[in-house]
Amino acid sequence: MPISIREAKASQQDREWIEQAYGDYLADLAADQTGVFPSLTVTGQSIAELVQGWFRDERSVPFVILRENQLAGFALVQHETAADDRKRHYRLSEFFVGASFRRCGVGRGAAMLLFSRFAGEWTIAEQARNPGAIRFWRRVVAEYTNGDFRERRAHGEVAHQFSTYRGATAPAR
């Protein structure tokens, strides 16, 4: 069951697929009653406008997640490095795996590939009202970093912070 990730900026088809899948992502967030959305209704943006913003933003790197070359999900990594900071900072801003691909290692595998691709300081934040996401990220980050991460709670979020500089590597599969 090979898991892979592919940068999506160069592909109109990948962008369109992400736009389509984003509706499922929002439905999952609403079902979990995270309170994160309806930000689209607050901002007046459509899903297409939101996703197109990712593709225009030079600090954003959208990915599609594949299992055996079948589209399974998407992720958005954002660079957050300040001009006066030598370290690279990354935020996993969006992460979604379709329902039929869950609980079989797709999310874990994709996360490991993303962490290995970008050496730096990472932040992954989840809504405090989303215990499933918190458990998932706590487990995946602990595995990737051998337990060397920080977890902080503030402003209704749980943030996992860790470094991929110190030789943290994805465990053998």
Image: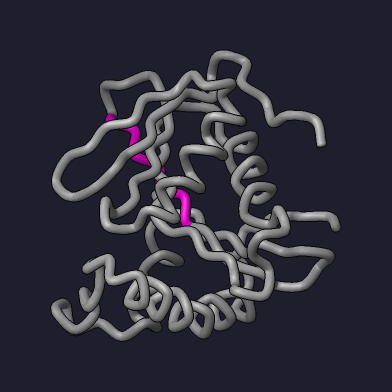
Residue at 14 percent across and 46 percent down: it is: 155
As drawn, 147 above or below 26: above
Give, as a single range, the part of the protein colored magenta: 76-82
Viewer can see residue 58:
no
In this image, 36 relative to 101: left or right? left
Quarter of the image where one finds residue 28: bottom left
Q: Please give the name of the residue rendered at 46% of the width and 46% of the height, measured from the top-left corner.
A: 135
Task: Report whether residue 48 is seen.
Answer: yes
Q: By what rule are the colours in the image chosen?
A: one colour
Q: Image height check: is 88 above or below 3?
A: above
Relative to the observer, which residue lies in front, 54 or 65?
65
Query: Which residue is at the front of the view, 49 or 113?
Result: 113
The number of numbered discs placed on residues in the rendered structure image is 0
**Image height of 165 relative to 100, above or below:** above
Residue 69 placement (x, y as % from top left): 81, 68
Q: Position of residue 117 (x, y in %)?
A: 63, 38
Q: Residue furthest top?
A: 166
Image location of residue 23, percent across then percent down = 44, 83
